[in-house]
């Protein structure tokens, strides 16, 4: 164990689910009725219907036409996708991030090469067939059933669930993500690159994370943020974090999740050498971190959704020194000129509800 790890992780105690799962050891589970599409299952909530999965599309395969009954965000991790909606075509290379609001019907997303996508669905999504008729509805219950059949233990959704001892470790052959097998810095910073590294964003639902500026907070200059979306409706924030220092003690007043893209992170009760690319975390509401930090020489970078404010302090039992909510994140984005993806698009032709009805009383 490194000296820095000993400082912030003095009580090595890896028992319990710890809110984390290494997706590299999870099996790919085929999705019935969709050729060339499989998923890794991380979390599914029986209470809210939200679930988080990683989707793999074989070369030439497509995510079918989808109706988002709730919102959905996607982050392209590897490969390259083409999204055609109406007369517009968007090319989505690794590093592309998008948000689709509830009540939207999106056209098929085709993989030009084998691709992996992180997908957070805030509720059920309906998959349509070639005639745009309902093929199946993918709910959190379906994700639970698929995980159970594959002997995958999902990350708990509550603080009490995280202290329950794990089941026996999985013994399947590891099937690592592409980001775990090489440097993934191209996801968040532009390279010299060829055409395969260049996106073409014709739809307002998507943004190239490489073009979003880094934001630093006063007093925490070693931590950078690329803010992607801020919701005034529910307070959710989506962002990429460059975490090269020690984050001060804080409590998650709302839940949060993140996927490590590059580097290694050390957390209390985690493994001595930390967690690396492909490890996905869910921090339930009420979770506290006295310290977390980078354990690698390269940048520690992860994608995160924050579902409520963070309260910072100087240690357990000390007064709150700072609260970060959607209000502060939005102000930071505006100050740095960040291009935020809009949460709703009243004039979007993909909306099932007609535009004149949006925002009006029935």
Image: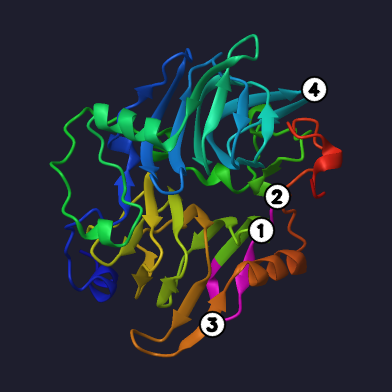
Look at the image and give the residue range highlighted in magenta: 212-223
Residue 294 in view in this figure:
yes
Circle nearer the viewer, 2 or 1: 1
For marks 4 and 3 on the same chain, the one whose residue lies earlier in the sequence: 4
Q: Residues within 10 Å of mark 1 (few under 14, many from 20)?
A: few
Q: CA distance from mark 2 to mark 3?
A: 26 Å
Q: CA distance from mark 4 to mark 2?
A: 20 Å
For marks 1 and 4 on the same chain, the one whose residue lies earlier in the sequence: 4
**Residue highlighted by disc 3:** 322
Where in the figure is residue 321, as x and y percent of width and height? 50, 86
For marks 2 and 3 on the same chain, the one whose residue lies earlier in the sequence: 3
Report whether 186 appears left or right of 54. Answer: right
**Residue highlighted by disc 1:** 233
Where in the figure is residue 284, as x and y percent of width and height? 38, 60
Q: Is 105 located above or below residue 119 in the figure?
A: above
For marks 3 and 1 on the same chain, the one whose residue lies earlier in the sequence: 1
Callout 3 secondary element: strand
**Residue highlighted by disc 2:** 343
Where in the figure is residue 154, as x and y percent of width and height? 30, 42
- Mark carried by residue 355: none
Q: CA distance from mark 2 to mark 1?
A: 9 Å
Circle nearer the viewer, 3 or 1: 1
Along the line of sight, the residue nearer the viewer: 178 or 296 = 178
- Mark carried by residue 86: 4
Asked if residue 216 lies in the magenta stretch, the reply is yes
Circle nearer the viewer, 2 or 3: 2
Q: Residue at x 43, y 33 (%)?
A: 178
Is there a contact, CB below 8 Å, between mark 4 and mark 3? no
For marks 2 and 1 on the same chain, the one whose residue lies earlier in the sequence: 1
Where in the figure is residue 231, as x and y percent of width and height? 66, 57
Q: Residue at x 66, y 42 (%)?
A: 101
């Amino acid at each position: 164990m490194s000296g820095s790890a000993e400082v912030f992780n003095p009580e090595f105690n890896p028992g319990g689910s710890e809110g984390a799962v290494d997706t590299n050891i999870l099996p790919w589970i085929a999705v019935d009725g969709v050729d060339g599409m499989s998923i890794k299952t991380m979390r599914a909530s029986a209470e809210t219907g939200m679930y988080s999965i990683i989707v793999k599309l074989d070369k030439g395969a497509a995510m079918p036409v989808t109706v988002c009954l709730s919102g959905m965000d996607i982050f392209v991790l590897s490969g390259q996708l083409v999204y055609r909606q109406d007369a517009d075509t968007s090319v989505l290379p690794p590093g592309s991030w998008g948000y689709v609001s509830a009540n939207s019907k999106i056209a098929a997303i085709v993989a030009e090469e084998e691709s992996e996508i992180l997908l957070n669905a805030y509720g059920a999504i309906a998959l349509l067939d070639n005639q745009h008729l309902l093929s199946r509805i993918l709910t959190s219950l379906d994700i639970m059933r698929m995980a159970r059949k594959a002997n995958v233990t999902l990350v708990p959704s509550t603080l009490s669930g995280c202290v329950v001892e794990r089941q026996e470790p999985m013994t399947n052959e590891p099937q690592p993500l592409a980001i775990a097998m090489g440097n993934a810095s191209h996801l968040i910073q532009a390279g010299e690159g060829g055409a395969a590294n260049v996106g073409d964003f014709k739809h307002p639902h998507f943004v190239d994370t490489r073009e979003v500026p880094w934001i630093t907070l006063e007093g925490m200059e070693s931590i950078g943020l690329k803010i992607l979306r801020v919701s005034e409706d529910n307070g959710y924030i989506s962002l990429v974090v460059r975490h090269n220092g020690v984050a001060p003690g804080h409590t998650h007043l709302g839940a949060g999740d993140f996927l490590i893209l590059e580097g290694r992170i050390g957390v209390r009760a985690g493994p001595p050498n930390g967690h690396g690319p492909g490890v996905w975390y869910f921090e339930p509401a009420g979770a506290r971190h006295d310290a977390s930090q980078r354990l690698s020489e390269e940048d520690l970078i992860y994608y995160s959704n924050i579902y409520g404010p963070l309260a910072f302090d100087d240690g357990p039992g000390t007064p709150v020194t700072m609260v970060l909510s959607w209000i502060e994140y939005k102000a930071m984005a505006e100050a740095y000129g960040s291009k935020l993806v809009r949460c709703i698009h009243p004039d979007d032709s993909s909306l099932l509800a007609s535009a004149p009805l949006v925002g009006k009383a029935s």
